[in-house]
Image: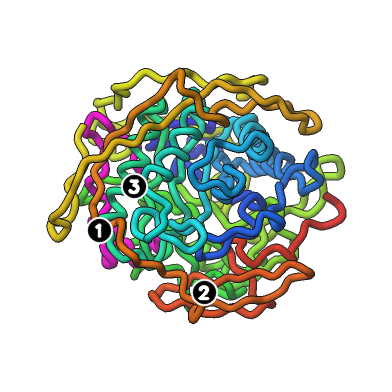
């Protein structure tokens, strides 16, 4: 299957028949994000790597199955920031934890698919908003994380950098734009010059509110180092249940008229593209089989502005989880897909035929995802060292932010290696320890307002529940700014309360 392709692909069906479709269709492979709640707090004891060599589900086998048998070609791998750095906000990639996540990335890349690194922290670290809460984390902390990851994966064309999962209740979106710019600049400076980068907005990056809540305006001027917007993609989510939270088994709308159509118009007018990196519904609910399929069909029909879509979720989720796309069975015995996966994601993207071959057509010069200009790093950085093969100007800030200073974050890179045994996988962690021998300096604009005392970690909007012996504090995403409490029987699609849904014995 030719999965690493440019925008403007077509899908061949039968003899001489073709229909337009988005470039990417796939699934979220969850587990490394388990234990993260919407305050950006993480209980590392709840992390559940979807890797058999770590005693977990066979996420690698699932991706192989989805690619080979279902014709899918993109996977999003959520992970907690705290896990990658072992609870040190400004720390390097941890020499024990990162190789495990890297093993899942290598398994993903090994399918020939595109693979999204998703930092699943809601624009927060332990309740504090990046760049906007007293006590951190700072823009430099966030940029350092992405510089480390981008250095490690700079040579992997199939890696997509998903900057942050579902930011919400961001006090100043213009400052958030500065934070996002810092991360983009860090990635490009690290040598990852051409990969896609996903730009998320506030309101849980809801597609429905992306323009109206100011997210689009805050992100529209984010640029690469050369001032272009090449491969900078808006990141949106949309659930189809009654409150848009993704916590109900039934769907009430396809959101075509009120969400995807107006967003498509905005994208077309501004020559930009978006990726729907989360959508889902009841795995075998007829209303969702209708509405999810309808939504994906609309995105296919508007593939000039929609890059693709990913369902939530498989990986470490049990097949009984209300939004589960986890197939039953195993690589040895064979896999059986959830009805929603087969009838919507596979059918809409691959025509219901896992052997369908995807091909490409030349891009017009006005393509929104790519331009003739190619981002060029202005700083030389060392390449990442791997033990095994596997695969200029900052945007203007808000006019209300009168005091703006340019700061420099010295982000160190390293080729220190750490070989860790992970069953059949052996990985080495580049960028896991800082070194003074080589450094990259990334300059970006930041507002003095980002040092304010705003802290949104209010206990009035959260509830603590216990799953087994592990207390978990969480909130569910909702479309409004007020957070809603969740009962233990109602799991959230982002994994914060999903720890009780362990994978089944047959994994």
Span highlighted in magenta in the image: 205-233
Q: CA distance from mark 1 to mark 3?
A: 16 Å
Q: Which mark is residue 241?
A: 2
Image quarter in which the N terminus is found: top right
What's the mark number on residue 180? 3
Instruction: Please state the horizontal and vertical placement of residue 374, each as a whole percent of the image.
Output: 29, 25
Mark-to-mark CA distance, 1 and 2: 37 Å
Q: What secondary structure characterizes most of the magenta part?
A: loop
Confirm or deny contact between disc 1 and disc 2 (CB under 8 A).
Answer: no
Does 173 sit above or below residue 199? below
- Which structural element holds mark 1? helix
**Labels 1, 3: front one:** 1
Looking at marks 1 and 2 on the same chain, the residue that comes earlier in the sequence is marked by 2
Measuring from the top left, give residue 89's x and y in whole percent. Answer: 50, 47
* Other residues around mark 3 within 10 Å, as few (<14) / some (14–19) / many (≥20): many
Chain-order first, disc 2 or disc 3: 3
Q: CA distance from mark 2 to mark 3?
A: 30 Å
Residue at x 67%, y 20% (from the top left corner): 388
Residue 326 in percent (x, y) is at 70, 55
Residue at image x 59%, y 30%? 112
Q: Which residue is mark 1?
A: 449
Horizontal side of 121 relative to 361 (left or right) equals right
For the point 64% across and 80% down, which residue is it? 487
């Amino acid at each position: 299957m030719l999965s690493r392709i440019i925008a403007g692909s077509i899908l061949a069906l039968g003899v001489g028949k073709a229909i337009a479709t988005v470039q990417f269709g796939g699934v979220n492979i969850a587990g490394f994000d388990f234990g993260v709640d919407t305050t950006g707090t993480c209980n590392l004891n709840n992390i559940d790597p979807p890797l058999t060599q770590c005693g977990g589900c066979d996420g690698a086998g699932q991706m192989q199955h989805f690619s080979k048998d279902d014709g899918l070609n993109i996977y999003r791998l959520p992970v907690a920031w705290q896990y990658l750095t072992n609870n040190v906000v400004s720390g390097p990639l941890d020499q024990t934890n990162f190789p495990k996540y890297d093993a899942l990335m290598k398994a993903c890349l090994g399918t020939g698919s595109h693979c999204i690194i998703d930092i699943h922290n809601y624009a927060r670290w332990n309740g504090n908003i990046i760049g906007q809460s007293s006590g951190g984390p700072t823009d430099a902390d966030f940029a350092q994380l992405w510089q480390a990851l981008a250095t490690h994966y700079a040579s992997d064309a199939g890696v997509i950098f998903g900057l942050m999962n579902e930011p919400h209740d961001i006090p100043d979106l213009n400052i958030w734009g500065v934070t996002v710019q810092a991360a983009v600049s860090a990635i490009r400076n690290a040598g990852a010059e051409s990969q896609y980068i996903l730009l998320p907005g506030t309101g849980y990056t809801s597609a429905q509110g992306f323009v109206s809540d100011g997210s689009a305006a805050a992100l529209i001027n984010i640029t690469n180092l050369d001032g272009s917007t090449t491969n900078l993609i808006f990141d949106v989510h949309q659930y189809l249940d009654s409150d848009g939270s993704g916590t109900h088994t039934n769907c009430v709308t396809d959101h075509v008229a009120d969400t995807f159509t107006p967003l498509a118009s905005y994208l077309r007018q501004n020559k930009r593209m978006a990726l729907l990196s989360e959508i889902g519904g009841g795995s075998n609910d007829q209303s969702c089989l209708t509405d999810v399929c309808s939504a994906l069909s609309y995105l296919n029909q508007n593939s000039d502005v929609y890059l693709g879509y990913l369902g939530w979720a498989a990986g470490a989720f049990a097949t009984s989880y209300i939004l589960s796309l986890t197939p039953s069975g195993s690589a040895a015995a064979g896999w059986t897909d959830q009805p929603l996966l087969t009838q919507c994601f596979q059918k809409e993207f691959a025509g219901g035929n896992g052997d369908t071959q995807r091909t490409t057509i030349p891009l017009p010069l006005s393509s929104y995802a790519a331009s003739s200009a190619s981002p060029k790093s202005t700083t030389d950085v060392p390449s990442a060292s791997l033990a095994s093969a596997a695969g200029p100007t900052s945007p203007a800030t808000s006019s209300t932010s009168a005091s703006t200073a340019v700061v420099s974050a010295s982000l160190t890179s390293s080729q220190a290696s750490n070989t860790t045994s992970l069953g059949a996988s052996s990985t080495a962690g580049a960028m896991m320890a800082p070194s003074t021998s080589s450094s990259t300096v990334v300059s970006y604009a930041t507002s003095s307002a980002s040092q304010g005392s705003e802290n949104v970690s209010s206990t009035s909007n959260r509830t603590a529940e216990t799953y087994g012996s592990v207390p978990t504090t969480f909130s569910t995403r909702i479309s409004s700014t007020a957070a809603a409490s969740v009962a233990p029987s109602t799991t959230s699609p982002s994994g914060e309360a999903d720890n009780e849904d362990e994978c089944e014995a047959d994994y």
